């Protein structure tokens, strides 16, 4: 009997694991054993052999950023000749292109641009909603904090409420990295504390918006810091549930490994086993978050497929466009046809979902014509 068997048995019995338990799992190399337990826990949430995906597009509306994260290859400093803000008409064109291929979600993210007033965001959201019926799953907590800074005295809650009223539907978990300040100070001194990130998310929950949580490993963080990250996400979800908010809180959890190429932060690139272990441990620790997304964009399609047996039930977005991760030299791309194929190769039935994880369309083998038409359109 190995040292982690008792921990895994308790998790399988429906009991919570502690931070100390979590650290012990991280220190173990019994990855397949953890993956098996994580898969069993996933099946409690999702007993049907279905893996979902969303047809979405990333729109990076600006690359100007005054946070200067050492791990980011995408941003340009204010005043840079390579800095940009996309014209509204370009954004509208990208949204229409997304709708034209049955897309349902726009992940609009950029830098923390000090030159954009708060009204830029609210006006843009209103104009988008006037023109299009699409879900705006947009802006990271760091961007929200920058909006607060330029809003002429609005509170965080007022900023989030105004964005929500203007058309922001849900918040992605970008910028979570590691929710511990020692590592955050090392990799991004000006980005804000883990508490700042969480305050934005909990404010969104309080006013009825759903969010997602993220985690990036490979910055040189300790195993304790990884465990604390998961505990802090779990505690925030507990609080949302206990208070009976209209929001479901964190609808999904997404983790990936730091991609050091082309960045100013040198670190050893973690391999697939470390990623799969993190996915499994996260699913075991986070017993109150229903959906786990595979990170094929950073890990590649084959590891993305394998993660569907390590606790993930979702293949994420088809990513019609993505510029931030690819700026760091990672360029995995998957179209609709190969998404369906990879999910099937994992022994699952593919299904298109929306941002709320509601299934819109199933692709079982009998839907051959529907599927061909869908792939042709995409």
Image (cartoon, helix red, strand yellow):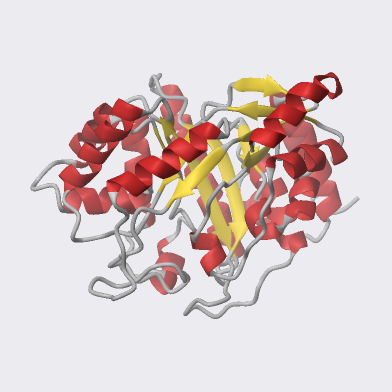
Q: Quadrant of residue 360?
A: top right
Residue lying at 56% horizontally and 64% vertically, measured from the top left: 326
Q: Is residue 10 left or right of residue 150?
A: right
Q: Nearer the viewer, residue 97 or 351?
A: 97
The quarter of the picture where the C terminus appears is top right
Residue lying at 43% horizontally and 55% vertically, measured from the top left: 175
Q: Is residue 168 left or right of residue 342?
A: left
x and y, in percent, of residue 218 in the image: 60, 67
x and y, in percent, of residue 198 in the image: 38, 45
Q: Is residue 9 visible?
A: no
Q: Is residue 320 visible?
A: yes
Q: Nearer the viewer, residue 60 or 69?
A: 60
Farthest residue to the right: give it.
Answer: 1
x and y, in percent, of residue 122 in the image: 22, 38
Q: Is residue 220 left or right of residue 69?
A: right
Q: Is residue 263 left or right of residue 2?
A: left
**Taking 129 as reference, is 66 above or below it?**
below
What is the number of callouts on the image? 0
Q: Quadrant of residue 15?
A: top right
């Amino acid at each position: 009997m190995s040292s982690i068997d008792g921990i895994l048995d308790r998790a399988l019995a429906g009991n919570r694991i502690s931070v100390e338990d979590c650290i012990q799992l991280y220190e173990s190399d019994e990855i397949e054993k953890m993956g098996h337990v994580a898969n069993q826990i996933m099946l409690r949430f999702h007993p049907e052999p279905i893996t979902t995906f969303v047809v979405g597009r990333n729109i990076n509306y600006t690359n100007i950023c005054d946070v200067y994260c050492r791990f980011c290859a995408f941003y340009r400093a204010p005043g840079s000749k390579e800095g940009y803000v996309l014209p509204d008409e370009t954004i509208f064109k990208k949204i229409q292109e997304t709708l034209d291929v049955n897309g349902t979600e726009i992940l609009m993210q950029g830098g923390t641009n000090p030159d954009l007033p708060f009204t830029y965001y609210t006006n843009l959201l209103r104009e988008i909603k006037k023109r299009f019926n699409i879900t705006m799953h947009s802006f990271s907590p760091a961007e929200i904090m920058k909006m607060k800074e330029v809003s002429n005295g609005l509170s965080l809650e007022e900023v989030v409420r105004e964005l929500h009223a203007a058309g922001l539907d849900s918040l992605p978990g970008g910028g979570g990295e590691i929710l511990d300040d020692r590592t955050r100070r090392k990799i991004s001194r000006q980005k804000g504390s883990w508490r700042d990130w969480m305050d934005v998310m909990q404010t969104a929950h309080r006013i009825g918006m759903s969010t997602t949580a993220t985690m990036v490993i490979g910055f040189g963080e300790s195993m304790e810091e990884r465990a604390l990250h998961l505990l802090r996400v779990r505690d925030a979800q507990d609080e949302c549930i206990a208070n009976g908010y209209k929001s479901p809180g964190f609808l999904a959890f997404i983790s990936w490994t730091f991609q050091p190429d082309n960045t100013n932060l040198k670190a050893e690139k973690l391999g697939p086993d470390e990623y799969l272990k993190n996915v499994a441990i996260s699913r075991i620790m986070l017993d109150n978050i229903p959906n786990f997304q595979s990170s094929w964009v950073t890990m590649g399609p084959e590891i993305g497929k394998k993660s569907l047996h390590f606790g993930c039930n979702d293949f994420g977005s088809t990513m019609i466009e993505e510029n931030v991760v690819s700026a760091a030299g990672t360029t995995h791309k998957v179209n609709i046809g190969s998404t369906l194929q990879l999910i099937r190769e994992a022994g699952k039935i593919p299904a298109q979902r929306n941002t709320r994880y509601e299934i819109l369309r199933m692709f079982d083998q009998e839907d051959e014509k529907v599927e061909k038409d869908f792939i042709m359109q995409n």
